[in-house]
Image (tube, grey):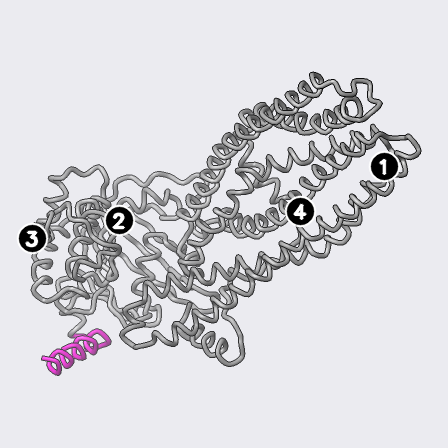
Amino acid sequence: MSLSTKQSAQSGGQQSGRRFVYQDDELLDKGFDWHQVKRLGHYLKPYSKQILPVIGIMMVVGALTKLLNPLLIAYAIDHVLREGGSHYGDMTLLAQCVAAMLALYVIQWAANNYRIRFTNKIGQKVIYDLRHDLFRNIQSLSFRFFDKRPAGSILVRITNYVNSLQELFTNGVVNLMIDCVQLFGIVFILLFYNVKLGTAIIVTVPIMFLVSTKLRVMIRRSWQVVQTNQSRINAHLNECIQGIKVTQAFTQEKENMAFFEQMNTDNYKAWNRAASLNQAFHPIIEVTGAIGYCILFWFGAYLIQQQEITVGLLVAFATYIGHFWEPINRLGQMYSQMLIAMASSERIFEFIDERPSVAEAANAKILPTVQGNIELSQVEFEYEPGRPALKGINLNVKAGQSIALVGHTGSGKSTIINLLCRFYDISNGTITIDGHNVRDVSISSLRSQIGIVLQDTFIFSGTIRENIRFGRLDATDEEVEFTAKAVRAHDFIMQLPQGYDTEVQERGSMLSMGQRQLISFARALLADPRILILDEATASIDTETELKIQEALKTLLAGRTSFIIAHRLSTIRGADKIVVLEHGVIKEQGTHEELMREMGIYHGLIQAQYRFLREVG
């Protein structure tokens, strides 16, 4: 989220009630999508051979035991308890009926208990597979994808949205099948024993569905609003945590809190509305059930007088109605659950369906070990249509040369590096390494031969040894320490409490900027890349540390092709070639001495740097 976007959102939230919206979090106003239901069902397919036999048996056993009990009650009332019954007063038969009912309840409990444990296990496997596919695809996406989306918005899809599908996969689908079987069984029994009374009771069902149709649409949209608001909150929280130092440094806590308060209020209202609409299903079921009972006892009493049914059958029908509205109620809740799942799955499959903007060719070759000859020919690139970042770049780099890229901010220095690593694809032209077009080789074989040290280096949670070994996971402890010594990081590491096994906090906050850069140097050099890129890698290092690195670089850069983006004269002066860029065009190139003699752009940059050093010195 840009600062201007946030400021307008804050202003809008306090004055006009407007809210900011991330581009990818616009509401998806779609109907119930059976295609998505099918896609979700696809994740159950691998487990179908395990699910169908167990669920089928447990479902039949559970349904039969529940449907037989009311018939036993009717038999006991009509034949044992009611005066004039064929076994009136037979306590032995009554005890047998009670024992049979108890046995059915025990069997039903055992079947349901086993089914729940089994479906929970399968459901968690499905959620594992879904989250795995989502994360794997996100890992493969190109920089353009992440340029347009806040980290929190991505995070919420992997966590909250996937979690919202757990209930659906663990119990929802199976309960849906059981409830359907139970409903058909009850309808069959009601119509089998008395068509008139059964039809009179069931006629209330269509009325209920007609009344609730409009409500379902409102529920679907309300849950989409909730999901969108939660995504925005997560994105904002992630930004706030990452930028807490800036927030406190500029004393913007109150404004930030006001902005969050507006988002939190919107989410609170959206959730309450969705929950209220969701709960409206239950009263509809209760009212419809009450109407069903009224019809049963009114019409049932009439049929008893006409001797078309017995008292026991009327009691059985009353029990069946109770069992009938239970699954109807659950089906209503299940529909709401499905709507929540739809709102979540729309977002999840959006990311799963996303494809990298930088894709390998179908017949991509493995890039062999390179010498490091690099050529850029008529390279053009634009981050956004109509805003070119590079215009017709031609650059020839011999193996082992060090190339310094110089220019004002936005001149295209980092863009050249991004294109060389194929973080983005060029719009026109070609980039070759040892004659191999980078678009014709596999991305992994290309990047495995390029080492990068960035200005804003990233330190992962874990030990210092693990962070350095990230450059080459199979490196031995001796290789890790040797590399650390080469970049002059060994001494400060050994002064830490556990040395190389010291746990660093998230993003390496316990280390200084210079120390983090040294670890990043060691990580890149441990990978032993043929091409090394230093993108403002010494910008955050003090002069003393930089002197140590300069000594290390003389040895480490030997025999490697290197690209150096820096403003410090000491870093670029010894480069074999200095390339000066301005507005995406190469204006000058040559050695330091050659460019100084030309008295051009480079000369002006160096003079400006000297003046600055004199003023601050």
Q: Distance between the residues labelled 2 and 1?
A: 79 Å
Q: Is residue 272 left or right of residue 425?
A: right
Who comes first in sequence, dot 1 or dot 4? Answer: 1
Who comes first in sequence, dot 4 or dot 2? Answer: 4
Which residue, given by chain and number where applicable, does mark 3 sit on? 495
Q: Answer whether residue 606 is magenta in the image.
A: yes
- Say what amino acid the circle numbered 1 marks: Leu
Q: How far apart are marks 2 and 3 (CA)?
A: 31 Å
- Please identify the quarter of the rendering in which residue 369 is found: top left
In the rendering, at what x and y percent does residue 416 appear? 32, 60
- Say what amino acid the circle numbered 4 marks: Gly
Which label is found at residue 450? 2
- Say what amino acid the circle numbered 3 marks: Gln
Q: Distance between the residues labelled 4 and 2?
A: 57 Å
Residue in the foreground of this view, choosing between 156 and 77: 77
- Helix, strand or loop under label 1: helix
In the rendering, at what x and y percent does residue 364 appear? 40, 40
Position of 527 relative to 453 (above/below): above
Query: Is there CB contact under 8 Å for labels 4 and 3?
Result: no
Position of 169 relative to 593 (above/below): above
Range drawn in magenta:
597-617
Which residue, given by chain and number where applicable, does mark 4 sit on? 332
In the rendering, at what x and y percent does residue 558 appear? 13, 50
Q: How dense is the environment of label 1, judged by Cα within 10 Å: few (below 14), some, or many (20 and up)?
A: many
Which residue, given by chain and number where applicable, does mark 1 sit on? 197
Q: Is residue 329 left or right of residue 391?
A: right
Query: Is there CB contact under 8 Å for labels 1 and 4?
Result: no
Of tags 2 and 1, the one toward the viewer is 1
Query: Is there CB contact under 8 Å for labels 4 and 2?
Result: no
Q: How far apart are marks 1 and 4 (CA)?
A: 25 Å
